[in-house]
Image: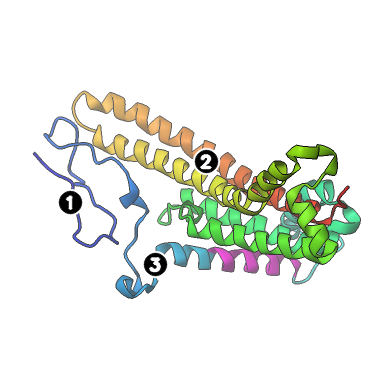
Amino acid sequence: MKEPAVSADPTQVLAFETDCHIFDGCGFPAPGLHSFLFEPLVGNPDSNLYFNKTMLLALLGSLIIVVFFWAAFRKPKVVPGKLQMVAEAGYDFVRRGVVYEIIGKKEGEKYVPIVVSLFFFVWMMNIWSIIPVAQFPVTAIISYPAVLALIVYVMWVSLTFKRHGFVGAFKNFSGYDKSLGAVLPLSMTIELFSNLLVRPFTHAVRLFANMFAGHTLLLLFTIASWYLLNGIGIAYAGVSFVMVIVMTVFELFIQALQAYVFVLLTCSFIQGALAEHH
């Protein structure tokens, strides 16, 4: 009975027999955590100083976004060309549809650049999942959403202290309301825990979990399509391949949606920091 080829190096992706199909006496090479581990392209993993595939995709994605907007607005025209029109539509969607709607035009204008940057960065990192050769969403590695959420968290907390001072910020974070009477201490404790610990955690995990699950499902149906290509299993392979296409289309929607939700929550945090406590 054939077994999946397992690398002795835990940083390597576990391989599977490419000639392994159903009825051949080998087990189904199901995707797992090993599908999210990559060999270093440069450096030594034992020293924690290395450069791997996800880092390369993050770097390339950042360059693509910068080059795209630079090319679109390098020589802006009153009557925009196709590239400028697409860039303006994306920028305006985030500015008017997210920032202005939640924070307001007057207060929100100064936050448009960072929110637009976050939206397109997250979206680009998600899109890698369906691009041939890359075929991996960078945000399915928890460290990337965590760093992005940390940036938003630091901005939100510092903005709250800057706007309201120490006492005002404490009231903002704790939901201070003296009308609550005896339950006020309990309410403040829950609010502080929720706002300062749970909120940034869920901000990161929401993005990570959706992309992790989506990539796992795509892997599952893709591997199954190949594995079932044998005998009567070919009929099931066809069904599995249709699911690959369906899941890919669905992922396109989820990738954009998760980028939208991430910046929507970011604007919600900023709006909360700017709002006056009553």
Pointer 1 residue: 5
Label 1, label 2: how many angstroms apart (C-alpha)? Answer: 29 Å
Observer-nearest residue: 223 or 262? Answer: 262
Q: Residues within 10 Å of mark 2 (few under 14, many from 20)?
A: many
Tell me: residue 16, above or below residue 158: above
Q: Which mark is residue 52?
A: 3
Q: Which mark is residue 90?
A: none
Badge 3 marks a residue whose secondary structure is loop
Given this view, does label 2 or label 3 mark the residue nearer the observer? 3
In the current view of this chain or complex, which residue is farthest to the left? Answer: 1
Q: Is residue 64 a member of the stretch shown in magenta?
A: yes
Observer-nearest residue: 167 or 26? Answer: 167
Q: Which residues are magenta?
A: 61-73
Label 2, label 3: how many angstroms apart (C-alpha)? Answer: 24 Å
Q: Which mark is residue 251?
A: 2
Label 3, label 1: how many angstroms apart (C-alpha)? Answer: 21 Å
Badge 1 marks a residue whose secondary structure is loop
Residue at left 20%, top 58%?
7
Residue at left 79%, top 58%?
169
Q: Quadrant of the N terminus?
A: top left
Q: Amino acid at mark 1?
A: Ala
Going by the image, does 12 lie left or right of 79? left
* First in residue order: circle 3 vs circle 1: 1
Instruction: Give the dominant element type of the magenta stretch: helix, strand or loop.
Output: helix
Q: Amino acid at mark 2?
A: Glu
Colouring of the image: rainbow
